[in-house]
Amino acid sequence: QGQLVESGGGLVQPGGSLTLTCTASGFDISSYAVLWHRQVPGRIRESVASLTASGVSDYTDSVRGRFTISRDNSKNTMYLQMNDLKPEDAAVYSCNAKTLSDSGQKISLWGQGAQVTVSS
Protein backbone atom coordinates (compact mmCIF):
# COMPACT_ATOMS: atom_id res chain seq x y z
CA GLN A 1 0.00 0.00 0.00
CA GLY A 2 1.42 3.37 -0.97
CA GLN A 3 2.06 6.14 1.49
CA LEU A 4 2.89 9.86 1.39
CA VAL A 5 4.79 11.45 4.26
CA GLU A 6 5.04 15.23 4.56
CA SER A 7 7.60 17.39 6.28
CA GLY A 8 8.61 21.01 6.41
CA GLY A 9 5.68 22.80 7.97
CA GLY A 10 6.17 25.36 10.70
CA LEU A 11 6.02 28.99 11.73
CA VAL A 12 7.27 31.71 9.40
CA GLN A 13 7.05 35.48 9.45
CA PRO A 14 5.09 37.33 6.76
CA GLY A 15 7.28 37.69 3.69
CA GLY A 16 9.24 34.60 4.59
CA SER A 17 9.69 31.33 2.77
CA LEU A 18 9.03 27.69 3.52
CA THR A 19 9.38 24.47 1.57
CA LEU A 20 7.08 21.52 2.07
CA THR A 21 8.32 18.06 1.15
CA CYS A 22 6.23 14.97 0.46
CA THR A 23 7.96 11.63 0.01
CA ALA A 24 6.22 8.62 -1.45
CA SER A 25 6.84 5.03 -0.49
CA GLY A 26 5.36 1.81 -1.82
CA PHE A 27 4.65 3.24 -5.26
CA ASP A 28 6.35 5.18 -8.04
CA ILE A 29 5.08 8.76 -8.27
CA SER A 30 6.53 9.32 -11.75
CA SER A 31 3.24 8.27 -13.37
CA TYR A 32 1.10 10.25 -10.93
CA ALA A 33 -0.17 13.80 -11.01
CA VAL A 34 0.88 15.48 -7.77
CA LEU A 35 -1.01 18.21 -5.99
CA TRP A 36 -0.90 20.36 -2.90
CA HIS A 37 -4.07 21.39 -1.09
CA ARG A 38 -4.67 23.53 1.96
CA GLN A 39 -7.46 23.84 4.47
CA VAL A 40 -8.32 26.33 7.17
CA PRO A 41 -10.69 25.19 9.94
CA GLY A 42 -14.27 25.97 8.99
CA ARG A 43 -13.48 26.42 5.31
CA ILE A 44 -13.48 24.03 2.37
CA ARG A 45 -10.23 22.50 1.19
CA GLU A 46 -8.53 24.46 -1.58
CA SER A 47 -6.31 23.08 -4.30
CA VAL A 48 -3.18 25.23 -4.34
CA ALA A 49 -0.94 23.73 -7.01
CA SER A 50 -0.80 20.76 -9.35
CA LEU A 51 1.85 19.13 -11.51
CA THR A 52 1.05 16.48 -14.07
CA ALA A 53 3.22 13.45 -14.76
CA SER A 54 4.28 15.16 -17.99
CA GLY A 55 5.37 18.28 -16.14
CA VAL A 56 2.53 20.74 -16.65
CA SER A 57 1.91 22.88 -13.56
CA ASP A 58 -0.99 25.02 -12.48
CA TYR A 59 -1.70 27.24 -9.48
CA THR A 60 -4.63 28.91 -7.83
CA ASP A 61 -4.55 32.64 -8.49
CA SER A 62 -3.80 33.62 -4.91
CA VAL A 63 -0.42 31.83 -4.91
CA ARG A 64 0.63 32.14 -8.54
CA GLY A 65 4.07 33.74 -8.76
CA ARG A 66 4.82 33.01 -5.10
CA PHE A 67 4.55 29.22 -4.86
CA THR A 68 6.33 26.61 -6.97
CA ILE A 69 5.40 22.96 -7.18
CA SER A 70 8.06 20.51 -8.27
CA ARG A 71 8.94 16.86 -8.19
CA ASP A 72 12.06 14.72 -8.16
CA ASN A 73 11.04 11.34 -9.49
CA SER A 74 14.48 9.91 -8.70
CA LYS A 75 13.75 10.60 -5.02
CA ASN A 76 10.04 9.76 -5.30
CA THR A 77 9.40 13.16 -3.77
CA MET A 78 7.34 16.25 -4.46
CA TYR A 79 7.86 19.76 -3.12
CA LEU A 80 6.02 23.03 -2.59
CA GLN A 81 8.29 26.06 -2.38
CA MET A 82 6.40 28.94 -0.79
CA ASN A 83 7.80 32.46 -0.99
CA ASP A 84 6.52 35.82 0.21
CA LEU A 85 4.14 34.11 2.58
CA LYS A 86 1.13 36.04 3.80
CA PRO A 87 -1.02 35.52 6.90
CA GLU A 88 -3.83 34.27 4.66
CA ASP A 89 -1.56 31.42 3.51
CA ALA A 90 -1.70 29.87 6.97
CA ALA A 91 -3.42 26.49 6.77
CA VAL A 92 -2.86 22.77 6.95
CA TYR A 93 -1.21 21.76 3.71
CA SER A 94 -1.67 18.26 2.32
CA CYS A 95 0.05 16.55 -0.58
CA ASN A 96 -1.90 14.32 -2.93
CA ALA A 97 -0.90 11.93 -5.71
CA LYS A 98 -3.46 10.79 -8.28
CA THR A 99 -3.55 8.47 -11.25
CA LEU A 100 -5.77 6.00 -13.08
CA SER A 101 -5.14 2.29 -12.84
CA ASP A 102 -4.91 0.15 -15.96
CA SER A 103 -8.59 -0.68 -15.46
CA GLY A 104 -9.53 2.99 -15.22
CA GLN A 105 -9.98 3.09 -11.46
CA LYS A 106 -9.08 6.37 -9.79
CA ILE A 107 -6.19 6.08 -7.35
CA SER A 108 -5.60 8.92 -4.88
CA LEU A 109 -3.18 8.98 -1.98
CA TRP A 110 -2.82 11.69 0.66
CA GLY A 111 -0.18 12.89 3.04
CA GLN A 112 -0.91 13.42 6.69
CA GLY A 113 -0.96 17.21 6.50
CA ALA A 114 1.50 19.85 7.66
CA GLN A 115 0.63 23.00 9.56
CA VAL A 116 1.92 26.25 8.12
CA THR A 117 1.58 29.30 10.36
CA VAL A 118 2.38 32.78 9.08
CA SER A 119 2.68 35.28 11.87
CA SER A 120 4.99 37.94 13.22
Image (spheres, rainbow, N blue to C red):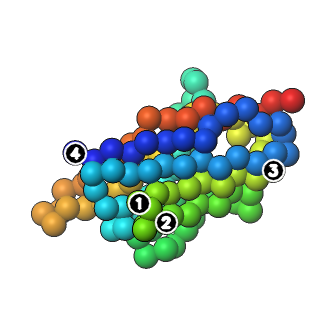
Q: Is residue 23 left or right of residue 117?
A: left
Mark 1 and 3 residues: CB-CB less than 8 Å, in contact? no
Count of labels in the image:
4
37 versus 13 height, above or below: below
Residue drawn at (74%, 57%) of the image? 66
Residue drawn at (44%, 35%) of the image? 112
- Judge by depth and name the residue closer to the eye, 28 or 98: 28
Q: Which mark is residue 72?
A: 2
**Quadrant of the image containing the C terminus:** top right
Q: Mark 2 falls on what kind of element?
A: strand
Q: Mark 4 falls on what kind of element?
A: loop
61 versus 116 height, above or below: below
Q: Amino acid at mark 4?
A: Gln
Mark 2 and 1 residues: CB-CB less than 8 Å, in contact? yes
Mark 2 and 4 residues: CB-CB less than 8 Å, in contact? no
Q: CA distance from mark 1 to mark 3?
A: 27 Å
Question: Who comes first in sequence, dot 2 or dot 4?
Answer: 4
**Quadrant of the image containing the N terminus:** top left
Q: CA distance from mark 2 to mark 4?
A: 21 Å
Q: Amino acid at mark 3?
A: Asp
Residue 13 percent coordinates (x, y): 83, 36
Q: Amino acid at mark 1?
A: Asn
Residue placed furthest toward the front: 75
Q: CA distance from mark 3 to mark 4?
A: 36 Å
- Judge by depth and name the residue closer to the eye, 9 or 40: 9
Q: Which residue is mark 1?
A: 76
Mark 1 and 4 residues: CB-CB less than 8 Å, in contact? no
Q: CA distance from mark 3 to mark 2?
A: 23 Å
Q: Which residue is mark 4?
A: 1
